[in-house]
Each structure stands twice: as C-alpha cells, then as structure tokens.
Amino acid sequence: MIAKERVEEVLERGLEFSEADQTEVVVMGGDTYLTRYATNYIHQNTAESNAEVFVRAVIGKKIGVATTNALDDESLRQAVGRAVAIAGVQPDLPDFVSLPGPDVAGTPAEVTAFSERTAGFTAEDRAAAVGRVTSLSARNGFEAAGAFSTSVLRLGVANSLGIRRYAETTTSRLTAIVMGPSGSGFADDSSADAGAIDVERVADVAVGKCRDAQDPVAAEPGDYEVILEPAAVAQIVMYLGFMGLGALAVQEGRSFMSGRVGQRVTGENFTLWDDGNDPSGFPLPFDFEGVSRRKVMLIENGVARGVVYDTYTAGREPGKTSTGHAIPPMMHYGPLPLNMFVKTGNSTIEEMVKGTKRGLLVTRFHYTNPVHPVLTILTGMTRDGTFLIENGKIKGPIKNMRYTNSVLDAFSEIEAISKEARVSERFIGSISAPAMKIRKFTFTGATQF
C-alpha cells in the first residue's frame, strides 16, 4: 500500500529532478485483490500492490514521456532523465500550448468514490460472496465461474506550473457466468462499496438465465426487433465513446461527430452525457493532468452537442478549454469520456417483452470490435442468454448470433427505454445504462452454440 504522504513525496521529488521547461508527474498506485472461481470452486486468490510513475517533460513544443514503478530517488531521476531525453529528439507539436496551470485546472468538486469497507474487504469476505453464487449454481446442477475483485486506487498529479492533486477511490465487481449442458447465464454488479454488491441478485439472475437458456434452437440471421439488457447497452455505449466522443478523434476526422455538432445523429429519445462528479457512478474529481472534471452533454435528445477535451486538444481549437478528460500520459487515444450516463425512460423489460410481436432479448454482447468508427459500425456476438420473443412472450432460447450494426442507427430506432439503469465499472470510470427496445437490429451470422 502506498500512502498519501508517499505519493506527494514522489510527485515533488520527480519535479525537482527535471530540467525541462515544463514537467508533469503522475503517480497511480494502490492495491488490487481478486478471487477467481470456476466449476463452482475458488481456484485463485491474488493480491497486488503497485505504483506507477508517469513523467511528461516539455521542451519548447517537444514532449517526452517515461514511466517507472520503482519509487526510489535514483529510479525517479532516471525516469525523468529519459522523459527529457525523449523530448529532446521529438518533432515539435505545433498546436501544443502548455501544460495546465491552476487557472486552467479549476477547483475539483468534493466528491469521492472511496469506501472504507472496500479497503478492508478480505479474501474471506470475497469467498463468502462467491460461495453464495456457487452454492445456488450447484443446487441447480450447473457450474459457475467468474470473479470478485476489489481495488483501492491512489492518484496524484503535480506539475511545474503549480498543479497539486490527490484522490483515493475504491472499486468492486462481482461477475458470474453459470453454465449448463447447452447454455449459460450471466450477471454482475459493481460498486465503490464492496459490501453493497447485491450477491443474491447476481446469483439468482445468472442461475435463472442459465436455466432458461438450455436447449437453444438456431435462428436465421437478419433484422430483428431487439430488447437489449443494460449490459448490452453499456457495451455499445462504451465503444461509441471510444470511437468518436473525444476531441482528438474529431480533429483527426475519424469521429462520427466531425462536422455534426448541432445536427441530429440519433432518435430524439436518446440522451448521453459524461459526468465524472456524479456520485451514482465512480466519480474522480480531476483528470490525469489535474484538471477538474466537468459535465459534458454529448448527445441531447438525439442532437450532437459536444465532445470531451484535454489541454492539448483544447489548444488546437480557438475558444476551447479542457473539460477534464485527459487519460494517462502513456496512452495516446486522446481524451475520453470515462463516466457516461444514458438517460432513462419510463418502461420495464417486462413491458417491452409484452409489446413485442417477434424479436430477441439479448443479455449481453461479447467480443465486440469496431468495423467502421466514422459510421459507428460494430460487430460482436451475443452471449449468456439470448431468447426469442413471439406474441409478447419469451418463447425460448436461441443459439448465439453475430451482430453487425451501426450504433447511431440502433439509437435512432429506440422504441422504449427502461426506467431503471445499472452502473457498470469500467477503466477508471463507469457507464450507467438502462435497457432498450430497438425496432431494427441487424444480425449477420449464426453459431452452433
């Protein structure tokens, strides 16, 4: 475990060792714990403590980045030296203006996603939760697999212009895949507070879906009316953010938002925003440059409203400022929305099923990949419970299918949205997504399982 005082000491020492025009030091450290299980048995417990230091050195308009996970003075000095040396041989970034100063960074909101209960959660606590899943699975003649993970993150950011930031967050997630002879079911839950994980719901849903998924039949590829459960919606929303809701993607012309801000891109019943300060998600009040996070409306009532910025991308456009969405310095994707929320509706999954003449109910997607980012086309597989609906009732399970569909097209065909959303933990953030009924969703292939 790395304490706050040690993080702050490393930040200051890193800055002292630099002779660059501007220097930024980021320390990301903490503890991760994992209990993994399969065939109804725990087979692995792990615990890892680590701390990474990212150094960004600026010489004029040249930037170099280096990293280390050794925190002694000599290792820090070497990392800083490498960053400075790398900067010295880089070409100029003509649009680079400056690292952020306190005037740009603002004052972070007083929010936290830290739970003492998560920080003190033990292997025995995780095992007890997993045991409730595996016991229910075994009593039904099935086999369960998955993991219960908890983590404590300590993040510090400092730069030579006066930025000083520190925050602590916790995360926990329980996943369950329950398998029978010819089908499987899935459920999960995430929370900053490990004690708030709804273990009974995870067990009941995963086992129930597995029971219902046995003896699936083949379905023909084609266009279907679909009901996507929150896990499926969260997956495609995550890729929508990655493909096109960051400023660098827009500036490089590889985003569906390029030239379309103010235009309709989805149906008017779809609204999406990013808010890293919302306590219902996994808030983190500042980004990896130390800039305070701001709420950004991405798509409002179907109209493209904006994207997220870091200081570099903001400097490339007149009048723009960072929205507090910089990612770690070693990543080169540009700013990303890490805390997305989809506006809920007024329906339920049961009502959606009842109003469907013929369609599919999808638990989640697997192995999703972008096909055409500008057109927001994704492809992937259904998994762990896909069911045929006929005349307002679930008729039975079907074998998994491959979808190939534009996310924007799907969100232009939304017929209903659930009144409840589920929050799923993602990389240093989360996605809050409801279930959706979509009039037309294209499946391009079928499987034998």
Image (cartoon, rainbow, N blue to C red):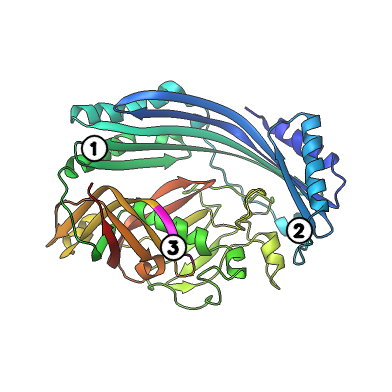
- Helix, strand or loop at label 2? It is helix
Residue 9 part of the magenta-drawn span: no
The circle drawn on residue 377 is: none
Q: Give the range drawn in magenta.
A: 368-373
Residue 329 position within the rendered picture, expressed as x and y whole percent measured from the top left: 67, 49
* Residue 207 disc label: 1
Instruction: Give the mark, 3 or 1, whose residue is nearer the N terminus.
Output: 1
Q: How far apart are marks 3 and 1 (CA)?
A: 33 Å
Picture coordinates of residue 103, whole percent (x, y) = 76, 58
In percent of width and height, residue 169 lies at: 56, 39
| Front-most of residues 389 and 301 | 389
Mark 2, residue position: 103
Horizontal arrangement in the rendering, residue 391 relative to residue 423 (left or right): left
Label 1 element class: helix
Residue 434 lies, with reference to residue 180, above or below; the image says: below
Check if residue 370 falls in the magenta segment.
yes
Front position among marks 2 and 3: 3
Which residue is rendered at x = 42% and y = 72% of the image? 302
Q: What residue type is labelled 3?
A: Val
Residue 284 placement, left or right of 101: left
The reply to whether residue 341 is visible in this rendering is no
Q: Is residue 264 left or right of residue 288?
A: left
Residue receiving disc 3: 371
Q: What's the residue at 50%, 70% (across, down)?
A: 256
Q: Is residue 352 left or right of residue 102?
A: left
